[in-house]
Each structure stands twice: as C-alpha cells, then as structure tokens.
Image: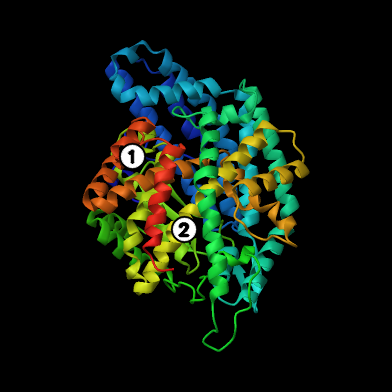
Amino acid sequence: MTEPHSEREFPRTFVPATADLGDWDAIEPLFEELVGRQVASGEDLERWLLDRSELSACLSEERSRRYIDMTCDTEDEGKEHRYLEFIETIIPRVKPYWHRLNEMYVANEQRQDLDHQRYCVLDREIEAEIEIFREENIPLQTEAAKLSQQYQKIIGAMTVNYQGEEYTLPQIAKFLEETNRAVRGEVWELVAERRQQDREELHEIFDRLVALRHQIACNAGFDDYRGYAFKAMQRFDYTIADAEAFHQAVEECVVPLYRQLNEHRLALLNAQGPTKKGETVEPIDSLRPWDTEVDPLGRAPLRPFDDVGELTGGVQRILAGIDTDLESQFAGMLERGELDLESRKGKAPGGYMSTRDEIRRPFIFMNAAGLHRDVEVLLHESGHAFHSIAARNDPIVAYRHSPIEFAEVASMTMELFADNLFSVFYDEDGAARAKRKHLEGIIRLLPWVAQIDAFQHWLYAHPEHTREERAHHWIELEARFGPNLDWSGYEHVRESLWQRQLHLYEVPFYYIEYGIAQLGALQIWTQFREDADAAVSNYRSALALGGSRPLPELFAAAGAHFDFSADTIAPLMEAIDIELSALPA
C-alpha cells in the first residue's frame, strides 16, 4: 500500500496531495498555473523550476507505475488498458504544455540571475527539446509507443514446450548450457522456431516504426531519424561520426579477440575425452549457435540458485563484500518489495530498473531462470538502483537521471566489482568459471553493440529499405562483427536475429550507450584492481552527481576518460586478456 503523501519522505508542495495524475482535469490546472505565474526574480524562477520539476516527477511516476504493472503481467487486459490510456490520453496533452513551459523558461530574463554552473546542463537540454518539438509529431509518437507495447506483448507471450513442460524463453535458456549437444541443439531449434512464428508480425511492426520515425524526423527539419535521435537523446558530447569511429575501433580491437575466444572454445570442445559414463564426445567440425553457452570442458552448467530468495541473498552478500552502504540500500529495497525477479508466462521480456520519480525510489524488474547471467543482471540493475538512490536528493528531477552513457557505467561497474566475490554462489572452480564467463561476455558484448548500432544507422539512413535489403545488410554486419559460427540450415534465423533486441523496437538508437559505458566501467575496474576502496569511493561520488554535469565530467569524477576510440579500447582489451590468461580454462 502506498503511504499517505503527508508521511512521504518527499511530500508534494505544488501538486495537490489528492490530485489524480491519470485524470487530465486534475493535471491541466497545474500546467495553467505554471504558464500564468508571474516570475519577477531569479528566486521566483528557481521556485517555478522546482514546481515544474515536481509536476514532472509526479507524471513520470504515474507512467512508471502503469508500465511496471503492465510489464509484470502482459496478459492482464486491465493493466494494459491503464498503460495505453496514459500513453494515448495524457502524454499527448502534456507535450504541448512542456514545450510552452520550455519556451517560457528560455525567454525569461531572470535566467541571467541563475547560477550558470548549476543550470548549464538543464539549459542545453531544454533548448534541445525546443528545437525538435513539433505538435504534429505527438500523434506519431503515441502510435510508436503503442507499437512498442505490441512488441512487448508478443515477446512476453512466447513459450515453448519441452519434455512435457511449458517454458518461457528466459526459463528454457538454461538448457543451452547442457553438456549434451543434442539437447542444446533441440532446445535452440525449438526457440528459433517459436520466434519464427511471429517473425512476419514483428517485421510489420518494425516497418511501421521506421516509417513513423522517419516522418517524425522530417517534420522536425532533419534529413533522417539519425540526426533527430541524437538531438532527442541529447547527445551533446559526441556525434554520428564518433559513433561510426566506435564501430571501426571495435572491429579492429575487439572482434579478433572475440573470434580467437571462439576458436579456443572449439578446440576445448574437441579436446574432451570420455564422459563420466564412459561415452566419447563426438568431434565438432564447427561452432554452431547452440555451442556458445555450454562449458567447453564439459562441466555441468553453473546453477547459482534454485529460487529468487537464494539469488537475492547471494547478491546481498556480494554487495556486503564491496561496500556495506550499498548492501544496506539493497536490503532496504528487499524490505520494501521493490523487486520482481522471477520469469513467468505473460511477463514482458528483459530486465530494467525504473525510478518512481515522485517517491524517488527504484524498482527492479527481470526474468530470473536459475542462470549465472541472472546474477549479473541483478547486479547490473542494482547498480542502476544505487545510482537512483545516490542522486535522489537533487530537487530537479532532470538532474536525478544521468545521460544513459553514464547510467550504464553505474550498472556495468557493479558487475565488475563482483567478479572476485562469486564464491558466495560457487566453489573455487565455479567462481573462477563465473568470472571467466563474465569477462568473455564483455568481449562478446562490444561487437554486438557495434553491430546493433551500425544496423540502426543504416536502417534510418535508408528509411525506404525493403525487408530483403534489411536482411542483406544485417548479414553483412554479421560478417563484420559477428562470431565465427556455422549457421548452415538456419540462415533464415540468422537474418532476423536482430528482432530479439527490444531496443530496436522500443528505444531506437539506445544501444551504443552500453558500449561507451562498458569502456567507462572497465576503466573503473582497472582502478579497483589496484585500490578497491578508492575505486568504490570514486564510483559513489560520480553517482551522486546524477545528471547535473556533462558526460565528460561524470566520467572524470569516476576516474575515467570519456573516450571510445581505439586508444582507449585496445589497452582495456589487453587488460581483460591478461586477466583471462590468469584464470583456469
């Protein structure tokens, strides 16, 4: 039950405590009051900004709560209706008011009395919002949001039957770690076939999204959606050319190491002798898509927990080994019921942390299925939660959220901090395997990030492409960035593999951030190996800044450089390679 507003840690001072933030008749008078208020001094303007921020936080939380409810149970039509109702009836009415308030702020003469150091980041964000706003785009953006929700519903409904049981896709993923290659192949094929059933509908949704997004960009005066997206995502500190340079640097510095790891994996798989049952492992001519998750030495899969209680208990012990304050924050989330972790039918895919901006509290959503990856995901989302908590005291809601490029540093660093503490789940051998799996996963991630991002650049630079051209270009990028896998007989699966990446449907151009952030996290990790206390202190100091400073300053506060060229990537890959060399196979 939600506590009364008067008893909240951050009670409302502008929005009435009884206001229903799902009712436009309750919302509109608040906007009108802000629009009509006389602002005669710098102090008046700051008060106006704080009241505007409170309204923004209240509306954001209303949307967040409805989104959480819907993703936790996509089969509940009532929850779906409440979320879509907000998307369709509230957000389209809110956007013109935000634009009007932005224009009022930029035009206000009292801005000169504000502290430039304090407000420079907010200023450039508001100016960018004004530049791209077009009222005719509001219904197009609403339609895009509804299409994204359709994608969630389709993916959330996907299940497969195996050996008489029904599994969600996250749940059945554990069989891809089985040492029996026939089992892995059978399960992989079941999942691939299930995805193929909705392939055409997902194509149709994506075709409509590309067309909508291109029209939105053209309406705002851009040649294509790339320029619009960079402005909308407020990428002030790097350009499209920088992103393309990142693709090239990953191709040069990471892909060779990635493929080398897979060659080594193939050799190890073929080096296995008789099993405990005396069975001889058949030689493998080439790596297939179902050979990438199994232990290459034929050891049983890592199974860190049987239920989410064991997962949260283990993660809490890991956090205690990193920083007792962070462990306490996690314990507080557990007590408040701010996590929904288990995978189940009808639950949306993936994982996320959502901040409920009014009460300034995080919520973690994920699909745990008993895999080691679940441990990493919970650590990742906990990093986001710690970021939310660290910045919660800033009165300006925009400053309680950092740019995604640094938000992901918070989460990815937490995964790396935990690498030497996996013994809470495993014996010595298992802990070493888990660490190797994580570090190799980083090498696998960066090429995938570059591939997805390069794919998006091509998609929106060629908005009239056909599905066949889309598939062809994806395969070209797979040859450039992908692993050396044998897709024989499954070329049709390979060409639509991108459909599993929800970011392409829901948050276009949000993906390179994972690559940029991973480089920042690795830089903090190199500090951590030398002086753990100093690295954790720098990390927490940077999180506390929220989004109040530009990206380069946020990275610098954590002791990292905001750079994603080969000059930064190459030594970090060398550091990972050295760390892997010190671990048993």
**Residue designated by label 2:** 440
Which label number is shown at residue 531?
none
Around disc 1, counting alpha carbons within 10 Å, would you say few (fewer than 14), some (14 to 19), or many (20 or more)? many
Nearest to the observer: residue 502 or residue 491: 491
Camera sees residue 476: yes
Q: Which colour scheme is used?
A: rainbow
Circle 1 SS class? loop
Nearest to the observer: residue 393 or residue 563: 563
Label 2 and label 1: CA atoms lie apart by: 22 Å
Around disc 2, counting alpha carbons within 10 Å, would you say few (fewer than 14), some (14 to 19), or many (20 or more)? some
Nearest to N terminus: mark 2 or mark 1:
2
Nearest to the observer: residue 254 or residue 81: 254
Q: Is residue 58 left or right of residue 95?
A: left
At 68% from the left edge and 67% from the top edge, which residue is drawn?
A: 189
Question: Residue 91 in the image: x percent, y percent?
Answer: 54, 35
For the N terminus, the quadrant is bottom left
Question: Residue 415 in the image: x percent, y percent?
Answer: 38, 55
For the C terminus, the quadrant is bottom left
Amino acid type of the residue tagged 2 in the rendering: Glu
Q: List the single residue furthest toward the top.
A: 109
Which label number is shown at residue 560?
1
Query: In which image quadrant can residue 380 be found?
Result: bottom left
Q: Is residue 122 left or right of residue 349?
A: left
Q: Do the residues labelled 2 and 1 touch (CB within 8 Å)?
A: no
Amino acid type of the residue tagged 1 in the rendering: Ala
